[in-house]
Amino acid sequence: MTMQIRSVRIESFASIRQMEIAGLEPGLNIVVGDNEAGKSTVLAALRAAFFHRHRAQTDAVREFMPYDGIGRPEVAVEFRLGSVDYTCLLYTSDAADDSLRV
């Protein structure tokens, strides 16, 4: 079964205030940007959305907090698995209402 990421929306995640990457096509998609533009942070956001426990209080999760201290990290990934479309939403904060929704 094949998974295809179709779009990624990131808000208040580490150095990224707001970013959307839409229109990803099947096959290879390349993210290009200057040094310190946030390419590695986009990958960290994808890892967080799919693999980090949403209530974890680890240093890795603390690193997701926005550098400017405003807002809470949010990542939305739209993807297709087989023939079914999904959206994975990650909302994190220091509060007890952290959530991960698929």
Image: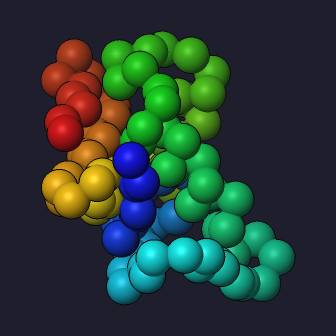
Percent across and percent down for residue 96 are: 22, 17
Whether residue 98 is visible to the viewer of this picture, yes or no, is yes
Residue furthest front as drawn: 1
Query: Which residue is painted at 24% across and 32% down in the image?
Result: 100
State the residue in front, 102 or 27: 27
Q: Is residue 21 left or right of residue 60?
A: left
Q: Is residue 1 left or right of residue 99?
A: right
State the residue in front, 83 or 74: 83
Question: In the picture shown, does residue 25 fall above or below 8?
Answer: below
Percent across and percent down for residue 71 are: 33, 51
State the residue in front, 80 or 64: 80
Query: Which residue is painted at 45% across and 76% down in the image?
Result: 26
Query: Which residue is painted at 43% across and 81% down in the image?
Result: 25
Residue furthest right as drawn: 35
Percent across and percent down for residue 54 are: 35, 24
Question: How does the figure colour the protein chain or chains?
Answer: rainbow
Question: In the picture shown, does residue 62 fall above or below 26?
Answer: above
Percent across and percent down for residue 36 are: 76, 71
State the residue in front, 59 or 2: 2
Which quarter of the figure has residue 21?
bottom left
State the quadrant of the C terminus: top left
Which quarter of the figure has residue 98?
top left
Whether residue 11 is visible to the viewer of this picture, yes or no, is no
Number of numbered discs on residues: 0
Q: Is residue 93 left or right of residue 33?
A: left
